[in-house]
Image (cartoon, rainbow, N blue to C red):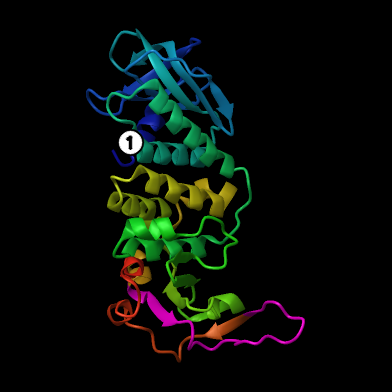
């Protein structure tokens, strides 16, 4: 169904009547429709297995009404009346509608082919939470985020990588599991010269620190952020909590820049082939102790003279639960 919902929404026009939607089924026999309401807003409509009622939601660019009677008109068919749950994107910006469609395609498989109203309502609440994050400014760069996602995509255990990923853009390390701390540094100029914090170069006592260095370059014919997210989601397809967590961290990171960023393309092959891991304890860095009355520091470190660690060799030095974070 990848990209199908967005394409359908592009060709569906607005109906003239209230409580009416022009629709197309996403798949033959499915419970899901792509649609437009009489305001021209994009929508997904869902047939549920019960008639349970839930309080409507109207917040952050999403409106949702549950188990309500609507008139729907499919192309080439007479209008029909159905009891449906309607999830409407009230923002008509093309980038936001594209993000809405991409997000819905990620979560619809977990709703099931014959969902209950309560199941749909739970999913809608999670969607509203994600859309609320689009109201805040970006908190990290797109290049940096793509670097982190590239680490996740090539991890031996993608679900573990998503689980150990930071919850907040301000956390000191991008990934933490057990005694392993990993921070990702992305460069768009093919140089391994990165800004590193004192804490990243000197992880807590007893912890092992790694710096992942990756080259992320824009490329018109490359893969998009949407493609990268889809690739990761395919690897954790049976884990809805993991997919929602992935989407939540991405939304928290890019905020209001996310809908447009979904179309940004980069050289995915370069990102994969350029990934190198460095032992944080041997990179050029400021080492403790810090001068009196100095509690933290940031510096630029040139890693080009450092030997990267072999993932296969390094795995032998860390606990089994930590090994899945590496390729």
- Chief SS of the magenta region: loop
Q: Is residue 132 left or right of residue 211?
A: right
Front residue (pair 9, 271): 271
Q: Which residue is drawn at the image coordinates 44% and 21% (left, top)?
A: 86
Residue linked to disc 1: 110
Which image quarter: residue 270?
bottom left
Q: Which quadrant is the C terminus positioned in? A: bottom left
Q: Is residue 181 magenta?
A: no
Q: Residue at x 62, y 81 (%)?
A: 299
Q: Is residue 105 visible?
A: yes
Expressed as whole percent of the image width and height from the top left, the position of residue 201 reads: 54, 80
Position in image of residue 79 (x %, y %): 34, 8
Which residue range is magenta in the image?
Answer: 273-298
Residue 229, above or below 129 = below
Q: Residue furthest bottom?
A: 305
Quarter of the N terminus within the rendering = top left
Front one among 152 and 98: 152
The answer to whether residue 194 is seen in the rendering is: no
Indicate the quadrant where residue 52 lies.
top left
**Left or right of 236: which side holds 265?**
right
């Amino acid at each position: 169904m990848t990209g199908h919902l967005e394409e359908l929404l592009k060709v569906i026009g607005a109906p003239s009547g209230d409580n009416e939607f022009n629709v197309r089924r996403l798949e033959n026999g499915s419970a899901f429709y792509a649609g437009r309401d009489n305001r021209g807003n994009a929508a997904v409509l869902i047939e549920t297995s019960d008639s349970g009622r839930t309080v409507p939601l109207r917040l952050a660019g999403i409106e949702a009404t549950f188990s309500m009677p609507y008139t729907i008109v499919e192309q080439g068919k007479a209008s029909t009346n159905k009891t449906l749950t309607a999830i409407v994107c009230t923002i008509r910006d093309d980038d936001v509608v594209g993000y809405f469609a991409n997000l819905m395609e990620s979560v619809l498989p977990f709703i099931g082919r014959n969902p209950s109203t309560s199941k749909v309502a739970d999913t809608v609440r999670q969607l509203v939470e994600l859309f609320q994050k689009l109201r805040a400014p970006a908190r990290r760069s797109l290049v940096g985020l793509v670097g982190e996602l590239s680490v996740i995509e090539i991890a031996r255990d993608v679900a573990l990588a998503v689980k150990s990923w930071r919850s907040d853009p301000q956390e000191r390390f991008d990934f933490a599991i057990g005694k392993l701390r990993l921070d990702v540094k992305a460069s768009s100029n093919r140089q391994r010269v990165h800004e590193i914090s004192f804490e990243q170069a000197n992880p807590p006592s007893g912890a092992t620190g790694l710096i992942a260095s990756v080259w992320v370059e824009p490329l018109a014919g490359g893969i998009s952020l949407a493609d990268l997210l889809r690739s990761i989601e395919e690897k954790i397809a049976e884990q809805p909590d993991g997919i929602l967590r992935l989407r939540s961290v991405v939304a928290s990171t890019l905020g209001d820049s996310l809908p447009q960023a979904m179309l940004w393309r980069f050289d995915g092959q370069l990102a994969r082939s350029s990934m190198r891991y460095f032992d944080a304890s041997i990179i050029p860095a400021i080492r403790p102790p810090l001068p009196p009355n100095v509690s933290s520091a940031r510096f630029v470190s040139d890693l080009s003279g450092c030997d990267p660690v072999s993932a296969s060799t390094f795995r032998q030095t860390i606990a089994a639960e930590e090994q899945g974070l590496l390729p």
